[in-house]
Amino acid sequence: MESNKQINVLIVDDSTSMRNMLENFLHHDPYIKVIGKADDPYQAAAFLKNQVPDVITLDIEMPKMDGLTFLKKIMAQHPIPVVIISSLTKKGAIETIKALEYGAIEIILKPFVEEGNQKEGIQLIIDKVRAASMAKVKAKSHTKYEVPPKYTTDAILKKKPLGINVQSNQKIVAIGASTGGTVAIQQILQELPVDSQGIVIVQHMPVNFTKAFAERLNQFCNIHVKEAEDGDIIQNGLALIARGDKHLTLKRQGTNYVVRLLNGPLVNRHKPSVDVLFRSMANHVGANAIGILLTGMGDDGAKGLLEMKETKAITIAQDEKSSTVFGMPREAIKLDAQKFILSLSEITDYIKHLTNYKSK
């Protein structure tokens, strides 16, 4: 159930201009209140002794104590939803992926405002804080200012008529996720056998972080995990993570399915978009596809999952109990887009079952 309960935010950043910008952006949402600003983790710790916010925005690179160390302390002593503010560097990307493993909920990339796109920057900050708050306080608020246009999947990929002729028996798994998805995806992939079905994944995450995320996953998994590149062949034992700045689609090429990365506007305010991937699966893979919609705020992927179901694909929505934020799966269930509602462990077992069935 949606709520207009106030979301209290503590901003932790060593940059005065960044603290002020975040505060200014968050003030555009009448239900978000900045209750404190700290320029280092020690000031933040002192603040937390007197008042506990619903969400903390936390810079990774700070003097005196780095953000990762402070995050570990927060999660050990008093878990609070944390949105990481990270710079676009190789070190920043690696540390941000570790922060997600340590319990951070969302990522905001510096700089998050480009010339002429302040509205998108405002919407981004508000959406990330809302999503983080949903992971705990289940509060969602509504803005009164003008928001950027929200494009549908049609802006990237047109829907094909039902009844496509699929000339292959290759099964492909498509996974979509947002808030809380990095942990969920890791839990699934690290349990899969080396010959598991080919997997394509859209996780809402900024560019460069998707590559670091894929490389991190590859350290833990039996299957090979990499960031998707245009022309990659989808094959067993391989999981491809969508780039953070391209829509991930696939097409039939000879006897193979290959990745096609597309530019274009944000769809459902996301690029990559889960709806775009799922429509591509419906258009080209049909009944041989398995669509899985995991934890996340918003509705990206819900309509795409329904399109997959209409082409006789197996469609799965993560259940509420195992979801960090039961937003995207809930919207899919409202549309009756899912064939199954499964927990995270049941989803893993289902993919493993596909592999076992294939090998018999």
Image (cartoon, grey):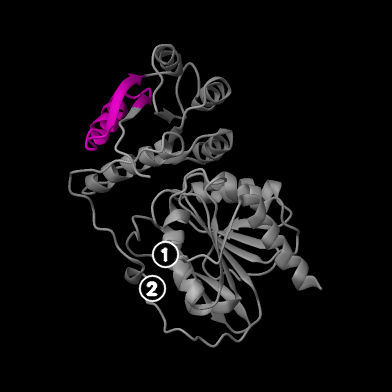
The structure residue drawn at horizontal position 18% and vertical position 43%, both measured from the top left corner, is 144
In reply to whether residue 24 is colored magenta, the answer given is yes
What residue type is disc 2 on? Answer: Leu
Residue 335, numbered circle: 1
Drawn side of residue 273 relative to residue 265, left or right? right
Badge 1 marks a residue whose secondary structure is loop
In the rendered image, the vertical position of residue 321 relative to residue 342, given as above or below: above
Residue 241 appears at what percent x and percent y? 55, 57
Residue 321 appears at what percent x and percent y? 55, 45
The structure residue drawn at horizontal position 27% and vertical position 48%, both measured from the top left corner, is 120
What residue type is disc 1 on? Answer: Leu
Residue 14 appears at what percent x and percent y? 38, 22
Where does the magenta region start and end? 9-38
The structure residue drawn at horizontal position 73% and vertical position 64%, both measured from the top left corner, is 353
Real-space CA distance between mark 2 and mark 1, rounded to the nearest whole angstrom = 21 Å
Instruction: Residue under label 2, please give it.
Output: 157
**Corner quadrant of residue 113:** top left
In reply to whether residue 248 is colored magenta, the answer given is no
Neighbourhood count class around disc 1 (C-alpha, 10 Å): few under 14, some 14–19, many 20 upward: few
Q: How many marks?
A: 2
Q: Quadrant of the N terminus?
A: top left
Q: Quadrant of the C terminus?
A: bottom right
Considering every residue shown, the one lying at the far left of the view is 145
Nearer the observer, disc 2 or disc 1? 1
Drawn side of residue 188 relative to residue 22, left or right? right
Question: 348 or 115: nearer the eye?
Answer: 348
